[in-house]
């Protein structure tokens, strides 16, 4: 049956806004031992190299994610430019959702060293993990690595605040969740034409995915959904229940 694309986008807008509100209600008073934080690249509208001064809502955008290491629950997400302003907005939201002392691991993005201590003073053990990669191949070998990441040859751990446990300094779980997000959300595909044309629609799609991931998708390692693992609910939700709860 034919359906106008604008109708589909209107439904996305409605359910996306409702899922934002549902996530805001559910993701509160989180107690966890460790959080992992990372950013996920996406394109909105056009490629960054084609943007002009007026293209504030188009180009390269990053989705900041904070995930509990044990329960794989996405505590907070925020889409914006990869700068200190958006990192500050994101960490402020994270700080309002977690309780007690928590260990945090991020990559080496410089903004984190300023905003993590700012929003979680005296209740965080904070470390950064920087991956080191092999030198680029000579130009004649470029064809062999064009669609593959460079080879990781080591990591550098740095304690920034407090006394983080070494065995918890990791970004592996949040990076694995990035793979899940890219797999189930065409808007994040690196190659192809499925990227978002509008930033608002991109954010609505993210809110819908996050709620589905936390409440409806059974994690293969946990054997339950992240929300059940964190004891925020006692059963796996269906998509129908998610929509019913979101639209109440």
Image (tube, grey):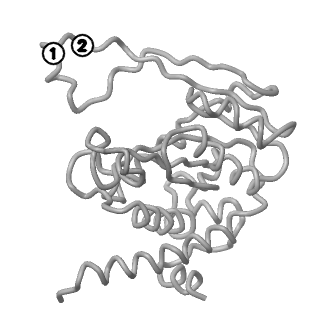
Where does the N terminus fall, quadrant-wise? bottom left
Do the residues under discs 1 and 2 have CB atoms within 8 angstroms?
A: yes
User: On the image, which quarter does residue 137 sit in?
Assistant: top left
Q: Is residue 1 left or right of residue 221?
A: left
Q: Residue at x 56, y 86 (%)?
A: 247
Q: Examine the rendered structure and indicate whether residue 66 appears above or below residue 196.
A: above
Q: Residues within 10 Å of mark 1 (few under 14, many from 20)?
A: few
Q: Residue at x 56, y 63 (%)?
A: 214
Q: Position of residue 188 (x, y in %)?
A: 35, 52
Where does the C terminus fall, quadrant-wise? bottom right
Would you name the residue on which mark 1 appears?
141
- The foreground one among 9 and 145 is 9
Would you name the residue on which mark 2 appears?
137
- Residue furthest to the front: 53
Q: Position of residue 243 (x, y in %)?
A: 51, 82
Total marks in image: 2
User: On the image, which quarter does residue 235 sit in?
Assistant: bottom right
Q: Residue at x 57, y 70 (%)?
A: 20
Q: Position of residue 144 (x, y in %)?
A: 17, 22
Q: Residues within 10 Å of mark 2 (few under 14, many from 20)?
A: few
Q: Residue at x 32, y 44 (%)?
A: 52
Kindly state the secondary structure of the residue where label 2 is placed: loop
Kindly state the secondary structure of the residue where label 1 is placed: helix
């Amino acid at each position: 049956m034919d359906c106008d694309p604008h109708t589909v986008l209107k439904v996305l807008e409605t359910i996306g806004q409702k899922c934002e509100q549902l996530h805001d209600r559910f993701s509160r008073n989180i107690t966890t031992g460790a959080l992992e934080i990372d950013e996920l690249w996406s394109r909105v509208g056009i490629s960054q190299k084609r943007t002009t001064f007026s293209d504030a809502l188009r180009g390269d955008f990053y989705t900041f994610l904070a995930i509990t290491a044990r329960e794989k629950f996405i505590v907070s997400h925020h889409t914006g430019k990869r700068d200190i302003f958006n990192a500050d907005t994101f960490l402020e939201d994270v700080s309002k959702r977690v309780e007690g002392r928590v260990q945090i691991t991020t990559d080496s993005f410089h903004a984190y060293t300023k905003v993590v201590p700012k929003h979680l003073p005296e209740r965080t053990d904070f470390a950064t993990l920087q991956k080191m990669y092999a030198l680029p191949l000579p130009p004649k070998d470029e064809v062999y690595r064009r669609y593959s990441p460079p080879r990781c040859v080591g990591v550098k751990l740095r304690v920034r605040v407090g006394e983080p446990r070494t065995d918890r300094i990791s970004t592996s779980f949040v990076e694995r969740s990035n793979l899940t997000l890219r797999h189930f959300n065409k808007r994040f595909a690196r190659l192809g034409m499925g990227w978002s044309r509008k930033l608002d629609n991109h954010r609505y799609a993210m809110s819908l995915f996050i709620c589905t991931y936390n409440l409806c998708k059974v994690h293969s390692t946990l054997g339950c959904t992240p929300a059940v693992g964190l004891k925020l609910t006692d059963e796996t939700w269906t998509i129908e229940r998610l929509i019913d709860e979101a639209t109440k």
